Image (cartoon, rainbow, N blue to C red):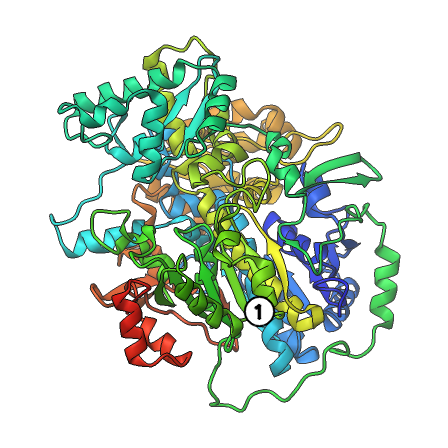
Amino acid sequence: MNASALGGLRVLDLSNVRTGAQVSQLLADFGAEVVHVEPPGGSPLRAEAAWPCWGRGKQSVQLDLHDPADLTVARRLAASSDVLVETFRPGVAERLGLGYEDLAADNPGLVYASISGFGRQGPLRDLQGYEGVVLAKFGALWALREMTTRPGPSFPSAAYCSYPASQLALQGILAALYERASRGQGQHVDTSLAQGLTVHDTFQWFARVVASRFPGAFTQAPPSVDGIPSGGLSFRLLIALTADGRWLQFSQTSPRLFEAMMRVFGLDWMFDDPEWRTAPDFEDVDRRVAFWERMLAAVRSKTLAEWREEFDRHPDVWAEVFLRDTELLDHPQMAWNQMVTVLDDPERGPVRQPGPLVRMEGTPAALDRPAPRLGQHDDAIRARAASDGPAGAGHPVTAAPAEGSRRRPPLEGVTVIELGTYYAAPYGATLLAELGARVIKLEQPDGDPHRNMLGFPEVAGLKVLQGKECVAVDVHTERGRAIAHDLIRRADVVLQSFRAGVAERLGLDAPTLLGLNPDLVYLSSPGYGTGGPCGHRPAFAPTIGAAAGLAWRNAGSTIPEQADLDVEVVKPTAMRLAAAVMGVGNADGFSAVSAGTALLLGLVARQRGAGGQAMLTTMLSSVAHALSEVMVEYDDKPDVATADPGLHGFHALYRLYEAADGWVFLAAPSQREWERLTGVLPSGGALAEDERFATVASRRTHDDALAAALAAVFRERPAETWERDLRAADVACVVAVDAPVEAQFLDEAGPGRACGFVTSGHHPVLDDVPRLAPLVRCSRSSTVAGDAGLVGQHTRAVLAELGYPDEEVDALARDGVVVA
């Protein structure tokens, strides 16, 4: 048995951006030997506050990949590696002689992972893959317009694309390693920041499909109109200020939880009052405003300490404080879950940071090595490259599959049993279904509540149900539990997301199920944890996002937080916080993509000798990793890039600008990009000769002046003209598209189709539907774009596999144990 999940694997990381760094960080955390290739003088990542976290556990070597001798070193390192990670623009690695085909010729077992901005096909493949550029091109910046009071789109500081892309790349790597063990061949896996952005969409895609197919029969109101909540969901997700000036995020999404909140607010009388009995839904705008103000007044009647006492007395009522910066590391649940660690860094001293993304009981992470010092391993790694054995020595390679043989998905033969509701954990299993796993969803007889969160039945749950077999079983009954146990005895993986104590009461906890199936990979993926101070609390994306600091990361510089705010200030500020915590990205997306990585890590560990084991991820800790750029504490920590008070961007060369007829996003932070920019701007010569803007450092010193100068220039021409002219000069400048994000992927005119991100599927009610293509592409293995099913659609077939005759299934259905 391996002492660590990934011990003995060699990883070569050629990337010098956050996405690649977080890929190799997780691999290093769980035992892989990671060599990070830095340019001479060191990686730009070393200037980031999060470098002690992203670089932990790795070795590094400085190589100039344009120098033939150093390129030879890199190629020799690749020849003896199991995994290579690169984040170049498509085509760059190939021009360097470090493309997959070049390296696989010497090392057929190599798993080669690429992460780009827009994928490796389509008209955007050569566009620089900056996070802000991707967000602008796919409509995300306009979707966040309510984060600020000024007109126009808004820029979020959170890595809504980069972190999910890192997790998708990890899933491709782990799936390819899993498949390599039986097939003997490596392969090229790739994903993109644009695909990473899609993980946050829980139901908007299919809401748009239905609205376009049945015009007038189904409409989905925006969260607010003219600054006023448009429907009951905004009141269930109430944001309000306490008497002592702290912002709270409630998430009472179900009728039962909302009724509990109204009782604690002293407003439950409304349910019996003819004027208010439809609460929280009102057609009349004035009635909505009056109801909103009553709720705000109720929250403002107590201090934060008094509200915490109320929460202790009423467990079904819960709100999180909007935390900021690194305050999440002090959250009591993070300590309980053992998901905060301190590493002694030889240059920085003790560094407090997020612990491992996954807590594995059998093969725990070993976080005992700090980030490497510059040059620390140069000599040793060069010597290793010179003396390494023949290519692929660590992983025997079988003959390649015969031409024309069936392409198989990498997780073919893996069975996952999903026990969970909504999106934050279940979508992690959806991602495994796209890689070929069989996913059987055990849901309650009336269906996962996520199915019917919108006015049109089934639409809200379509995305998360894709590729799954839907088996409806009441696991609260003895016979229902027996069915679940029969399935789990034959399964490879169980994913559950119950609140603390529920799995134990149902007999679906890790000790029970590992007793039935010792080889089971069992992942608990709840909001908070399987115990501890908050494990029993209801957890939804807004509350987790507030507690993790997601909203404050995006809009904190614009948010007043004091006790004496007038209600006419409180209301628009609450709406801005709502956009900041749920406007485009959210804790559900971050958590689901993290759960997918954890599931694959468990499978690879089992395959490498670890056996079955219990594992834990949580929504809270997943967002900690998604916000790792700020989630570190040590003396003299450098400033973290944060959007300006106007929420235009990080600095003058990475921000939004208003054009003559719209907005553009410019990303030209490097000296080389500055020279290209000034070479094509009408007044570029004057800017280039201005001493204030001569160097990267001087431009940062005079950032406000440079932003003002560029703002004047960009107002002179239409946005599309700027994109055309600057892209022709290889400067990343794109129109900030004013359209829903899902439209940019789904609609015929959007870039998503041209990039190959869309395919077709089928649904029993909606017939043929467009859907996202699998988010990881494999060069040799196939992927699976499965369909969503109805409640109980597959119950009879799955029970037949277990040996249940039709007459017994009929009896179970009559008794309400199953829906078949």
Q: Is residue 303 left or right of residue 334?
A: left
- Coordinates of residue 214 in the picture (x, y in percent): 14, 54
Q: Is residue 112 left or right of residue 251?
A: right
* Depth order, front residue of 99/421: 421
Which amino acid does the dot numbered 1 rest on? Leu
* Depth order, front residue of 104/537: 537
**In this rendering, does residue 417 appear at all?**
yes
* Depth order, front residue of 597/75: 597
- For the C terminus, the quadrant is bottom left
- For the N terminus, the quadrant is bottom right
Q: Residue at x 18, y 26 (%)?
A: 272
- Coordinates of residue 58 in the picture (x, y in percent): 76, 53
- Coordinates of residue 665 in the picture (x, y in percent): 43, 39
* Depth order, front residue of 345/36: 345
* Residue 804 in which image quadrant: bottom left
Q: Residue furthest left?
A: 216
The relative height of residue 341 versus residue 245 in the rendered view (above or below) is below
**In this rendering, does residue 173 appear at all?**
no
Residue to which mark 1 is pinned = 516
Q: Residue at x 56, y 88 (%)?
A: 401
Q: Is residue 233 left or right of residue 138?
A: left
Is label 1 in a helix, a strand or a loop?
helix
- Coordinates of residue 628 in the picture (x, y in percent): 61, 41
The relative height of residue 625 versus residue 774 in the rendered view (above or below) is above
The relative height of residue 156 versus residue 401 in the rendered view (above or below) is above
Badge 1 density bin: few <14, some 14–19, many ≥20, Cα 10 Å: some
Q: Residue at x 26, y 54 (%)?
A: 459
Q: Is residue 815 left or right of residue 566?
A: left
